[in-house]
Structures are given as structure tokens and as C-alpha cells.
Image (cartoon, rainbow, N blue to C red):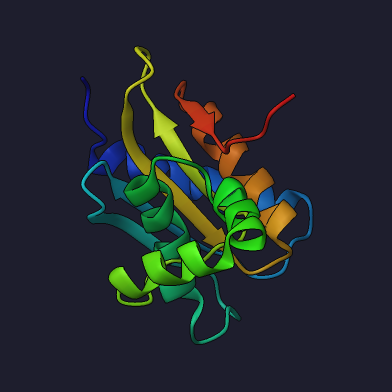
Amino acid sequence: MSTLNLNTAVSISNRALAVGREISAAPLTVAVLDAGGHLISLQREDGASLLRPQIAIAKAWGAVALGKGSRLIAADAQQRPAFIGAVNSLADGNLIPAPGGVLIRDEQGEVIGAIGITGDTSDIDERCAINAVESVGLTADAGITA
């Protein structure tokens, strides 16, 4: 299994912010975590609101902690609110069930981390995350089924 290093995490973050500027997204905050849920990179654009770093980290952390993109966690929250509420309690409130948290998989399909983005609509946050991860040759797993 490969690991996610600082250089790759910063490249992913930079690409996510560049995509946001290309599509005129609201100011974004991007967090990249390793497979253990530890923060590697956090970037907050000028104009991003006060809680955005915590939200971005929580989207990514939830993806790593539950092994699925935050879009699927959001669906779980709608279908099983008591369960996600209990999990969020166990997580000390550090789980954000909204799209924008995407697992990062290596060439073998192993989870090596996650990215969390917040600032615009959840769909745009997720779009920036997917594009950023794929731009460095890794696989973005948002839990989107075809």
C-alpha cells in the first residue's frame, strides 16, 4: 500500500482550488487527510467563512472513518438518522454528512486518504475534490454509483 505524502497532498489541494477558480466557485477550503485520518494539508481561500476548515476536515475524516464518500454518508443520514447521529456522537461531532468528502485510492485500490472540500454547494465541492484527486493519477471514490 502506498502512502499519501505532503507533496501529493499539496498538489491535490492546489488543483482543487484551481478548479474552483475555473468554475467561479465561492471561496473554498480544502483538507487532505492520510488513511489514519490525520491532517496533511489544509488550505482556506481568502473570503472563506470561519468554520470552513472544521467542515472540510470533518467531510474528509468521515469518509476515512466510515470507508465511504460523504455523499453516501449523507444518504445514510437521510435513511438512518439515528445511526448517523450515534456515529457522530462517537466521533465527537466531527462528521459532516454532506457531499464533498472523497476517499483517495492508490493504483491498487487501497484507501490512502481523503479530501474534504467546503465553501460552495456540496455538489461543486465534490466536483472539485474528484477533479483534484484524479489530476495526480489517483482514484477519487465519492461513492457515486452509475
User: Going 23% across and 38% down the picture, which residue do you hit?
Assistant: 5
Near-viewer residue (123 or 82): 82
Specify the quadrant of the image occupied by residue 9: top left
Assign the C terminus to one quadrant of the image: top right
Q: Is residue 99 above or below residue 109?
A: below
Quarter holding residue 95: bottom left
Side of 144 relative to 49 (left or right): right
For the question of whether residue 129 can be seen, the reply is: yes
- Viewer-side residue, 12 vs 121: 121
**Spot occupied by residue 89 in the image (x, y as percentages of width and height):** 35, 75
Residue that extends furthest to the right in the rendered view of this protein: 23
Residue at 22% x, 22% y is: 2
Residue 119 point in image, percent of width and height = 63, 69
Going by the picture, which residue comes out furthest to the top? Answer: 108
- Residue 119's place in the image compared with 32, above or below, is below
| Residue located 55% across and 62% down the image | 97
Give the residue at the far bottom of this rendering.
50
- Counting from the top left corner in percent of width and height, residue 75 is at 65, 52
Q: Quadrant of residue 112?
A: top left
Horizontal side of 20 relative to 88 (left or right) equals: right
Q: Name the residue at 47% across, 59% down.
A: 59
Q: Position of residue 52 (x, y in %)?
A: 51, 76
